[in-house]
Image (cartoon, rainbow, N blue to C red):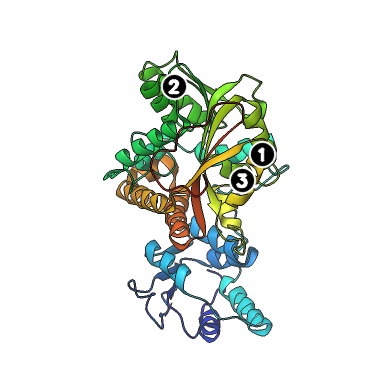
Amino acid sequence: MGLAVTGPLRREVERALPSRPFALRFWDGTELPATEGGNGAGPAPTFTVRSPRAVAHALRAPGQLGLGRAYVSGELAVDDLDAVMHLLESWQPPSIDGRDRVRLMLAAVAAMGLTRPPRLPESELVPQGTRHSRERDARAVQHHYDVSNDFFELFLGPTMTYSCGVWARSGASTLEEAQEAKLELVCAKLGLQPGERVLDVGCGWGAFALHAAARHGVHVTGITLSPAQAERARQRVAEAGLGDRVDIRLADYRELQAEPFDAIASIGMVEHVGEVQIDTYAARLAELLKPSGRLLNHGIARQRHSDPDAGDFSERYVFPDAEPLHLSRVLLALERAGFVTQHVEGFGADYAQTLQHWAERLDASLAEATRLAGEERIRVWRLYLRAARNGFLTGFTGIYQVRAALPGGPAPAEAPGGPALVR
């Protein structure tokens, strides 16, 4: 640990943060205890700084990214991720003036000692190319999804449905029941009829395509940018004997040629589109529909216009280039493309409950999950699932199903169940 000393850093942290709802433990056995408990939900969490390399990460990229790198690499550990989520929600750290910042930086340099700048964690994706270009979008999607199909199945369950289930309105008591209810709700809102052609944008591992083809007799074309997803989806289609009704393609929505569909389902994909492409996205979907064709757009949305973006950690480790837009922006894009919005429904509480189940299932299979995905990604996913749930609980994010249609046909039947925000 050449010439690394933790005393100055402990003293400066204690001086800058005299009231601390967390404890710090360092590699040399010294500690800085919490001065208050958690936010009433349990004990204060302890952050263990395992080596000077954790400090080096923080100095190399001050703020969220540096701390994230230290955590992902295992140089910074936390004893209770749920307590950390409560801390982030409730604690407002005091402002630190420029002079104190300099003192903290010099103390961190002393704690780092002669440590060389550490390498970036292998699971970090450094953005390259034009944001939301086809090539960069493909890399971003593959970084998130092409980990291991078996890894995702550990916590998603046998349906491999990677979006929120529907709980309260369906009376579901298990994750599988909630996902079944969501898939059927999408079909009902689209009013699917036997023999119709349906496009599944961002089809994932094929859950909706399989359900719609088997239960409603439609022909589904599913598209994804993830080779791993496409491979498993095709396997599931073959196993279900639905090869004559489901076609899974490795394709970008911008690549599809005109082949008019009766209906389009986009479930959990619009979050990847971005502000610069949202109008193109809506216009392309309109071009792919027959006159009076129906669209069900299901996606996460930012709630408050005053909130900051998700931050560098999510950009590099979780959902590169993900950009949940405000619901109003999505609706504007659909209107510009010629769609008429017929029904909007929110499911924020349902997603929070779904994420709770995913987190519990992942924690119950940590050894196998680590074998499949590696220690770095497991750290990312355990934190991400909790942070995402916290976002829905605090109102940072919401999730909405928007049913819209092109003009030219008879008025649609009333959307099944649930209060509408727009009708």
At label 2, the amino acid type is Gln
Residue 325, above or below 148 = below
Foreground label between 1 and 2: 2
Residue named by callout 3: 330
Q: Position of residue 260 (x, y in %)?
A: 60, 20
Residue 346, above or below 49 = above
Q: Position of residue 236 (x, y in %)?
A: 40, 23
Question: Which comes before the other along the chain, label 2 or label 3?
Answer: 2
Is residue 135 in sight in this rendering? no
Q: How far apart, in angstroms, are the residues tagged by discs 2 and 3? A: 27 Å
At label 1, the amino acid type is Arg
Q: Secondary structure at mark 1?
A: helix
At label 3, the amino acid type is Val
Q: How far apart, in angstroms, are the residues tagged by discs 1 and 2? A: 37 Å
Q: Counting other residues with Cα less than 10 Å from the Cα at mark 2, is it few (<14), some (14-19), or many (20 or more)? A: some
Q: How far apart, in angstroms, are the residues tagged by discs 1 and 3? A: 22 Å
Tally of marks: 3
Residue named by callout 2: 193
Question: Which comes before the other along the chain, label 1 or label 2?
Answer: 1
